[in-house]
Amino acid sequence: MGLIGMFAFLQVYSVQAILPVLITDFAATEVQAGMVVGATVLAIAIMSPFLGMLSDAVGRKVFIVGALLFLAIPTALIAQSPSIGWMGVWRFLQGLSVPGITVVTIAYIGEEFEGRAVTELMSFYVSGSVLGGFMGRFLLGHLHELIGWRAGYYVMAAMTLLGALWVTKMLPVSRQFVANPNFRSAIQTLGEHLVNRYVVTACLLGACVLFSLVGCFTFINLHLADTPYELSTGALANIFAVYLLGVIITPLSTTLLRRFGSARTVRAAVVVSMLGVLLTLVAPLWGVVIGLAVMSSGVFITQSATISYIAVNVKQGRSLASGLYYLFYYAGGTVGAWLCGLAYAYGQWQFTVWLLLFVQVLALLIASFGMIKTKSKAA
């Protein structure tokens, strides 16, 4: 589960490490650069509910393997991009395949396991996705310095193909999956989810979570590439090592969830994340790095608690519920890439920070008034 999460997110945010280079190479604006990140995120948002329905009808493993194989194609095509616009097109195509991995994997875990095992496997999946987010940025940043970003994307495509072959061999076939090809039933289930307090609260929280993460880790690159830091792509890639904290912290969050419950864990994690964002305003580089580490740790705990909240409390149409969650989650990331780009263009990093804090206050309000205590038997 951890490695599936890693392969799913290896490509999603890799471009963040080379944004300053793309602005120079393509003579692009900050908003255009941000939307190259947002293009993949937007496609994931659009496709998540539909691939959830298709997976409920067809199966789990076939979707995960097929999505990884498709993901390698636009990853290789990015290397041929003649303009920032074409790069956005290939990035959008990347995003079309990602829900075939993410949404279906969450449904797979919810079907094949129960009780404490669900929470633990979800935390390993999130840890893997965190590792993939780090590895994508780290590898591409250093590959650019060694062979250029275009050749670097060929390497990334080859890695994705290897991931597809590995999943084909290692992932067990579903034992509990029951096909539901009735799309009329799926639409009815969708309507039920849209008025389900558990699903709606998780979806709104997810939107705030990825808004914060995409906005922060996209435009901190431009901030640190500018005066007085003037970091290279390799140095920016190294900054993303703070993501590795999430690999360690997310599995430990299961202990917090069992002891304090989802609602209190999320509230505490959002407050921690807000403190981290504020720390990025300090002048020394080490202070900014600590701020990013604190901010991302809070976000990862929030994400792990939120998707576990869905897995434990939603029993019917799990794949569709996961698809709805990711629709809101990645829609939040797309809006974050756009609005934070406008904020950065208007008032640099300081304006971006105030916007991020505003969204995190919304997340705190949603967690405080929307989340209800999970029944002890289900927990």
Image (cartoon, rainbow, N blue to C red):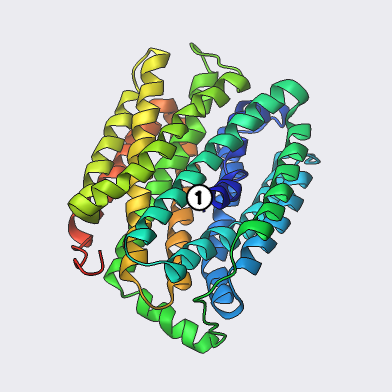
- Residue at position x 56%, y 60% from top? 99
Report x, y in % for residue 166: 67, 52
For residue 347, side relative to residue 68 (left or right):
left
Residue 270 falls in which quadrant of the image?
top left
Report x, y in % for residue 271: 24, 39
* Numbered circles on residues, count: 1
Report x, y in % for residue 67: 66, 60
- Residue at position x 29%, y 67% from top? 198
Could you say which is closer to the camera, residue 172 or residue 327? 172
For residue 142, side relative to residue 375 (left or right):
right
Q: Is residue 114 visible?
A: yes
Q: Read off the residue under disc 1.
A: 334
For residue 45, side relative to residue 85 (left or right):
left
Crowd rating for badge 1 (residues with CA inside 10 Å; few <14, some 14–19, many 20+): many
- Residue at position x 53%, y 65% from top? 104
Q: Is residue 362 visible?
A: no
Q: Amino acid at mark 1?
A: Thr
From what the image shows, is residue 82 above or below residue 163?
Answer: above
Report x, y in % for residue 30: 56, 33
Residue 167 falls in which quadrant of the image?
bottom right
